[in-house]
Image (cartoon, rainbow, N blue to C red):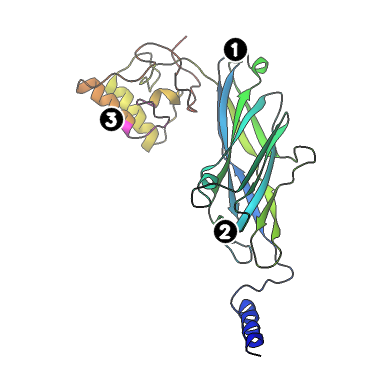
Amino acid sequence: MYRARIRSVMLVGLFCCGFWLPADAQWQFEYQPAPAYVLYDVSTGEGSGTASISIAESPENYGFPNPVWGFALSIGHDPTLLEPIDVAQGAAIEGINSGYGPDFWAIGIEPDGIYAGVIYSFLSNANGYYETPEEIVVVHYQTVAAAFVGDQDGENTTIFGLEVGSPPVENLVVVDVPGPNQSAVTLVMDGVVNLVPDRDMVRGDADSSGSIESLADAISVLNYLFVGSNVTCLDALDCNDDAAVDLADPIMLLTWGYAMGANLPAPFPECGADPTGDSLACDTSMCP
């Protein structure tokens, strides 16, 4: 009798303390690709870049935020423009399971898309929570070179939800709730991929005047950062070549010009390609 009473109390507690699930409970998640940039060499058409894909839970879900046990992701692309070459774990997945990563990680690369299947922990000892978007997958693409040889204008394309593979992989998220785990509805948002010609430029020539004047160019960088003025070669504003444009860049430019600071990284002071190949675009410059 004593054991029976204990079991009864435990069952009542499950229903009283927030674990009871209504029969019509449903969950919805979104896969959100961030805007991506793929830079290519106009003379060869060869280029590469990455697309970051995040997951976010709808705040209208029952029990938000809910623990996620795993997911399947399947996205497509235009195979006449892009070719996937690798699928890597995003930051949120690398850190799951106390930093050990997921117990199961499988990927597939097809001509028309990629897929990934993930289980965080076979024993349900690790879960993810996605009140805000978290990066789960990074896809590395290269251009279909023949499509971009001599293309000075660039292209825009998208990545999108597509059941890839054989058998086709469905986009879904598994919610770790008491009783049978529940498959959640997953919306896949389209992601824009900007295919941009990688033009020669001079680092620090922020106003694209054809010469570097530390004060004038530093002011151009500051106007871009704080006023929102347009620039024609964003890569030239990255004076310290850290793949970002921020306050450190005009400071480096002024230090070079007025305080005998170090030269800016290549290409400087002559025209050339950015050797680090980051995602900062250069639409036009004074370089031939």
The residue carrying pointer 2 sits among few (fewer than 14), some (14 to 19) or many (20 or more) residues within 10 Å by Cα, namely: few
The image position of residue 238, as x and y in percent, is 39, 27
- Residue type at mark 1: give it: Thr
Comes first in the chain, label 1 or label 2: 1
Identified at 63% across, 76% down, the residue is: 14
Tell me whether circle 2 and circle 3 mark residues in contact (CB < 8 Å): no
The image position of residue 120, as x and y in percent, is 60, 51
Identified at 61% across, 24% down, the residue is: 142
The image position of residue 221, as x and y in percent, is 36, 29
User: Can you say whether 200 is above or below 101 in the image?
Assistant: above
In the image, 22: left or right of 251? right
Q: Which residues are magenta?
A: 238-248
Q: Nearer the viewer, mark 3 or mark 1?
A: 1
Tell me whether circle 3 and circle 1 mark residues in contact (CB < 8 Å): no
Residue in front for this viewpoint, 180 or 264: 180
Main secondary structure along the magenta-highlighted residues: loop
Residue at the disc numbered 1 = 44
Distance from the alpha carbon under mark 3 to that under mark 1: 36 Å
User: Can you say whether 280 is above or below 106 in the image?
Assistant: above
The residue carrying pointer 3 sits among few (fewer than 14), some (14 to 19) or many (20 or more) residues within 10 Å by Cα, namely: some
Q: Secondary structure at mark 3?
A: helix
Residue at the disc numbered 2 = 125
In the image, 210: left or right of 69? left
The image position of residue 207, as x and y in percent, is 38, 22
In magenta stretch: residue 137? no
Residue at the disc numbered 3 = 251
